[in-house]
Image (cartoon, helix red, strand yellow):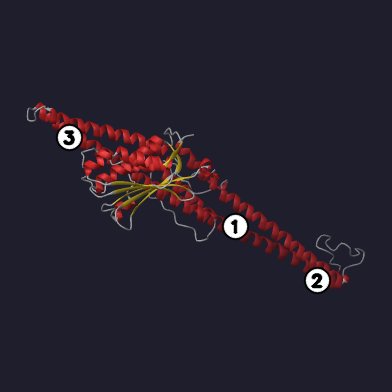
């Protein structure tokens, strides 16, 4: 099916006004399409029901009136609506009173027929107006869908006044458009961020190499070390982007394994002994009892390392506390630093891609390159393993990250 074939088909079914395409305008074929649409079918159905109701009501009322009159004055020979008064003796000439009664009968029937026809016309008109009100929001949805298909992201349809399913559908359509607009803006921003983060090390590489070629910069170990650092930054950026994409799409390979949160934090602290000493940071672990959890050991270690790297980058030389406990529903791992914490705007964007609280700080105090994807990877890896992560400013100061892993049946047993 071609992309453009969806909207004309919906327009034809709803009976809405098709958008002009080319110079054809609205010919007889388009009018036939409109008559066969939802609005036309509803109008004919409502009108048919109204006409039948009027016919049945009118005939029943007139017939009942004739029967009552015939019982009260049988000498008039009116009979019922259906026998035409033929029970009267044809050999006896009708009296003047009977002639007047029969003329009144014809007038009553004629008046009833005229009233029925008029009521049917009114019913058709009212049915057309009602169905127009019913199908107008649907026609707007068809038009909005066409604009959305054409690439517009600012489509907002007016909500119907009645609080019904059509209003809910229109509201859901508007929310979808808003979400798509935000997603489109986020995608454009992401592409710009990727281009910027790739352009910076490439520009440094180019300038350094050109300086060496021109003889301005000596090709010594220091220069090669700078080039090597920029290459490592590019490699880490590409690796982080791939890892983040795999985690968010659910394509990453995980090996869930029963672990002890206390042992995981102790191993992390041992691995960072030299780094925290160089940064002048005091690292403490608080876990008085085993904390069972199920996670991929490599990905969990990578998650905790990213958070700890972030703490060492922005909180040094303040202390960093690691803690683990069981809260009755699952394992809770916490990393808290005693640094300046988050600014209000930074806290809400902490897990965004390429977002840095200080855009000028792309490297930690030890000179390690930062891709700006660390916390985004943390959230993606945590959620891929069924956990959650939150960030806040601790009441006593500093930033605090909390990871929660729900208990599984083996852990509760």
Q: Which residue is mark 3?
A: 204
Residue that appears at 36% across and 44% down = 184
Does label 3 or label 2 sit earlier along the sequence?
A: 2
**Residue count near mark 2 (Cα–Cα under 10 Å), binned few <14, some 14–19, many ≥20:** few
Q: Are marks 3 and 2 in contact (CB under 8 Å)?
A: no
Q: Which residue is mark 1?
A: 127
Label 2 secondary element: helix
x, y (%) of residue 67? 83, 67
Label 1 secondary element: helix
Q: CA distance from mark 3 to mark 2?
A: 113 Å
Nearer the observer: mark 3 or 2; the answer is: 3
Nearer the observer: mark 2 or 1; the answer is: 1
x, y (%) of residue 371? 27, 39
x, y (%) of residue 321? 32, 48
Does label 2 or label 1 sit earlier along the sequence?
A: 2
215 is higher (above) or lower (below) than 76: above
Q: Quadrant of the C terminus?
A: top right
Q: CA distance from mark 1 to mark 3?
A: 73 Å
Q: CA distance from mark 2 to mark 1?
A: 40 Å
Q: Is residue 364 visible?
A: no
**Residue count near mark 3 (Cα–Cα under 10 Å), binned few <14, some 14–19, many ≥20:** some
Q: Does residue 169 appear to the left or right of 215 in the view shown? A: right
Residue closer to the observer: 54 or 26: 54
Label 3 secondary element: helix
Residue closer to the observer: 342 or 197: 342
Q: Is residue 144 visible?
A: yes
Residue that appears at 43% across and 40% down = 260
400 is higher (above) or lower (below) than 254: below
Q: Which residue is mark 2?
A: 100
């Amino acid at each position: 099916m071609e992309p453009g074939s969806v909207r004309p088909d919906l327009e034809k079914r709803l009976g809405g006004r098709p958008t002009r395409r080319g110079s054809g305008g609205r010919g007889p074929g388009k009018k036939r399409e409109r008559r066969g649409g939802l609005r036309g079918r509803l109008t004919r159905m409502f009108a048919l029901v109204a006409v039948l109701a009027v016919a049945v009501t009118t005939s029943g009322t007139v017939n009942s009136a004739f029967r009552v009159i015939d019982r009260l004055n049988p000498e008039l020979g009116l009979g019922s609506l259906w026998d035409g008064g033929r029970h009267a003796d044809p050999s006896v000439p009708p009296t003047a009173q009977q002639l007047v009664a029969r003329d009144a009968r014809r007038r009553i029937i004629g008046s009833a027929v005229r009233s029925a026809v008029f009521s049917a016309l009114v019913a058709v008109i009212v049915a057309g107006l009602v169905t127009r009100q019913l199908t107008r929001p649907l026609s707007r949805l068809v038009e909005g869908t066409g604009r959305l298909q054409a690439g517009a992201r600012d489509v907002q349809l007016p909500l119907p006044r009645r609080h019904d399913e059509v209003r809910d559908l229109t509201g859901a359509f508007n929310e979808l458009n808003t979400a798509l607009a935000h997603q489109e803006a986020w995608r454009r921003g992401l592409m710009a961020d990727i281009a910027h983060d790739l352009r910076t090390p490439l520009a440094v590489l180019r300038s350094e190499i050109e300086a060496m070629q021109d003889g301005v910069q000596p090709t010594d170990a220091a220069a090669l070390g700078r080039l090597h650092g920029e290459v490592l930054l590019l490699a880490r950026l590409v690796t982080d982007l791939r890892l983040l994409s795999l985690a968010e799409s659910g394509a990453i390979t995980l090996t869930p394994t029963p672990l002890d949160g206390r042992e995981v934090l102790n191993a992390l602290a041992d691995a960072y002994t030299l780094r925290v000493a160089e940064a002048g940071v005091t690292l403490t672990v608080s876990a008085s009892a085993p904390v069972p959890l199920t996670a991929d050991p490599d990905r969990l270690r990578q998650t905790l390392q990213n958070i700890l790297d972030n703490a060492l980058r922005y909180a040094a030389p303040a202390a960093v506390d690691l803690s683990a406990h069981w809260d009755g529903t699952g394992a809770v791992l916490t990393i808290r630093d005693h640094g300046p914490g988050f600014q209000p705007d930074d806290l809400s964007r902490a897990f965004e891609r390429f977002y840095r609280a200080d855009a000028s700080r792309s490297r930690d105090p030890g000179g390690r390159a930062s891709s700006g994807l660390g916390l985004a990877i943390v959230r993606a890896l945590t959620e891929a393993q069924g956990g959650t992560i939150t960030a806040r400013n601790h009441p006593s100061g500093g930033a605090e990250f909390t990871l929660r892993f729900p208990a599984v049946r083996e852990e509760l047993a």
